[in-house]
Image (cartoon, grey):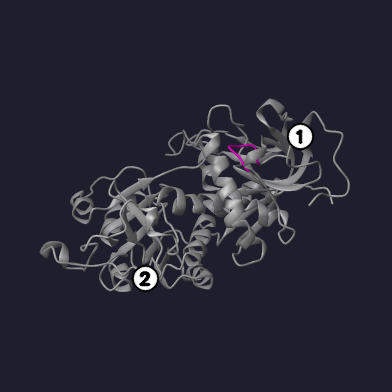
Amino acid sequence: MALSAPLRRLPHMMRAVLVDAAPLSGPPAVEAKNQQSFKLFLGSAAMPQARKEKNEILIRVCAAGVNRMDVLQKRGKYPPPPGASTILGPEAAGVVASSGTRFREGDRVMALLQGGGYAEYVAVEEGLCMPIPSTLSFSQAAAIPENWLTAYQLLHFVAGLQPASTPSSACFSSSPPSSATATADSLNSSEHVERQTDACPFVCAGASGRRLPIRSVLIHAAASGVGTALVQLCRLLAIPTIIASAGSDEKLQLCKTLGATHLINHRAVEGRFSEAVKNATHGLGVDLLLDPVGASFMQENAQSCALDASWVLYGALGGVRVPSFDLQLLFAKRIRLLSSTLRSQDLSYRESLVRSFEETILPKLADSSLRVILDSIYTASEADQAHQRLEKNENRGKVVLTFPCPS
């Protein structure tokens, strides 16, 4: 949908959220003496140019999503890919300021970016843009590209989930092995229970193309932007048991409204959640585990997995180094340990992901079958407060920044 008044005269400079990496003040003996404050402020930056030879369009940004990678990037721990904007922000929504082949001036679009979203304007390949449904605001749309595309990618492109209705020929072999799942005690006895396959999505595992039904999933950080998307997408796939893990009961109640069938407050159990997972799965463990935490949850995650489980690691909120981990659990359970990031994928991959998502999931967001969960909205000048909310793990859903936008 295009706005009635197209944008014409473009400035040479723009407003953007920038990072002030000033040293922290204090006595020399303070432990943090070599740390920096990394404050965000609204300043001026050069206007980006849409390169027609790269099929780019220019977007007047109205809203930008706030992500964990932004917090890491401002601290110098997650540099943008080569050639990408050094301005923070991997997703934005706004109005087309210079036309492409599909989108025209004034069209409302959202875009998956490698950077540059925290600014009044951003240039992006047209193939990474999607139209904003009339039922969604700019703030809602800005919460979609990075988080929802990440969730969709993890389930379908990384784990390889396919709906139960997909023909068995999708795998090389349509016959699952007779020992596809383990009871709590059967790993030692080698007596296994066959997975129940009716009405469950599945993954194709290994060169043999075994079809492994997904009856249960454990989603960590389930109240985050990606987490709330994962809960709903798993519900859409009709996974019978959806276990949400989060750090507060309030966050878990949100997950319940989105479709989680079981709730685990990992703080209440001091990170020892595997027993609760086994209780929720009749002692079997989960067939799919979605983990943005990493090091601090590794051992409990392995204990939470069923035989032939798929474990997708997509973040390291709990650290990147594991001091002690029993690999025998991975071998004994034949766990598929997968990992991925989205930002550094090549352009053709990201464009394919965007098109697939636009065709299959965006219509369900447009008609409210799936919900964008907004935690809070800040103006661009309040970016520092927005980051603080994320860093303190206070958010339930997505944090968004807004810029002045044409009406």
Label 1 neighbour load within 10 Å: few <14, some 14-19, many 20+: some
Residue at figure coordinates x 61%, y 42% from the top left: 89
Question: In the displayed structure, does residue 232 sit left or right of residue 206?
Answer: right
Q: Is residue 30 left or right of residue 110?
A: left
Question: 376 or 34: nearer the eye?
Answer: 376
Image point (43%, 57%), residue name: 162
**Magenta extent:** 112-117
User: Is residue 154 shown above or below 218?
Assistant: above
Q: Residue at 72% x, 62% y: name it.
A: 135
SS at mark 2 in the image: loop
Q: Which mark is residue 198?
A: 2
Secondary structure, magenta segment, majority class:
loop
| Residue that lies at the very extreme toward the left in this rendered image | 189
Q: Horizontal and vertical percent for residue 384?
A: 62, 46
Where is residue 217, by image quadrant?
bottom left
Using the image as rendered, state which of residue 267 and residue 280 is in the foreground: 280
Q: Which residue is mark 1?
A: 14
How far from the left and from the top, in percent, is residue 167? Answer: 41, 59
Placement of 330 over or under 213, stated as above or below = above
User: Is residue 139 covered in magenta?
Assistant: no
Q: Amino acid at mark 1?
A: Met
